[in-house]
Amino acid sequence: MTAAIEVRDLVVERGKRRVLNSISTTVPRGSVTGLLGPSGSGKTTLMRAIVGVQIVRSGSVLVLGQPAGAAALRRKVGYLTQAPSVYDDLTVRENARYFAALYGYGATAADAAIRDVGLADAAGQLVASLSGGQRSRASLACALLGEPELLILDEPTVGQDPVLRAELWDRFHALAAAGTTLLVSSHVMDEAGRCDRLILIREGAIIADDSPADVRAAAGTTDLEEAFLRLIQEREEAVATPGDRAGSTAVANERQTP
């Protein structure tokens, strides 16, 4: 499939810490790709690099055939950050209609986006009065308004109840079926099975990049959380240097010597 995102040998550092360690991956068009990993693994940094707002040390990121952050991508890429990006002193409806106007759409499109994220009953409320989960959905409604070719969603289901989470994932797949590409991050492993493809990341390195079925098969388990744990263990064993192993063996032998 044609790639919507192409990441090659990407390195990002903050101070002396390497946040992304020469990673490479592709995200196919018209898919829902999950970016899974624990907090602090590098998910948000990778998303920021794809959007073009992250300073990188080396490597390249192409988005819809353009360098990440190119002016030509501004109307083609939607980005939902972890922190809500709507105005507290406006209502949900006023926020949505404001962003709709920026994209050249009318009130009908704004109201439809609000319904799509399950906020129709709260449309007249000030954003400042909403719960954290509702604020996140208000931001999502605004991100959907431009009908972007690519949606980058950073943990969009955090704080949502199980029913709403399921509805949001149905919405994500409907968007993908219509041709939108979605990259959705999460640290909740039970969402992994809802994705067409998975990128599992830990400590700035990609440890799996495949379909959920193939990730399970590679790890020899039907449970994705268990698969993730096994792949982490395999990686840690693989990167152990011969010197480390030899040293561990020597210490063990010394302890066993009378």
Image: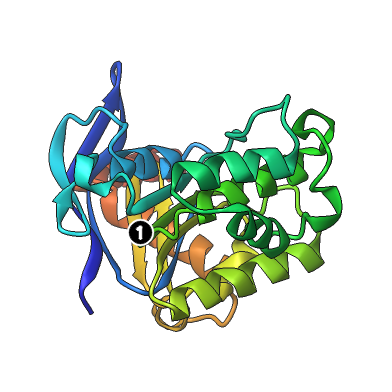
Instruction: Decide: is 80 above or below 196.
Output: above
x and y, in percent, of residue 169 in the image? 62, 69
Instruction: Decide: is 177 above or below 171.
Output: below
Q: Could you tell me which residue is drawn at 40 percent across and 77 percent down?
A: 211
Image quarter hosting the C terminus:
top left
Number of marks drawn: 1
Residue at the far top: name it: 15
Q: Is residue 124 visible?
A: yes
178 on left or right of 136:
left
x and y, in percent, of residue 209 in the image? 34, 67
How are the residues colored? Answer: rainbow
212 on left or right of 241:
right
Q: Could you tell me which residue is drawn at 76 percent across and 34 percent down?
A: 127
Q: Is residue 224 visible?
A: no
Q: Could you tell me which residue is drawn at 76 percent across and 38 percent down?
A: 132
Instruction: Decide: is 139 above or below 191.
Output: above
x and y, in percent, of residue 221 in the image? 53, 80
Question: Considering depth in this image, is 60 or 167 the residue closer to the camera?
Answer: 167
Residue under pointer 1: 207
x and y, in percent, of residue 117 in the image? 69, 59
Image quarter hosting the N terminus:
bottom left
Q: Could you tell me which residue is drawn at 38 percent across and 75 percent down?
A: 179
Type of the residue with mark 1: Ile
203 on left or right of 95:
left
Q: SS class of the residue under badge 1? A: strand
Question: Considering depth in this image, is 133 or 113 the residue closer to the camera?
Answer: 113
Question: Considering depth in this image, is 181 or 8 the residue closer to the camera?
Answer: 181
The local crowd at label 1, few if under 14, some if 14 to 19, many if 20 or more residues have their Cα within 10 Å, is: some
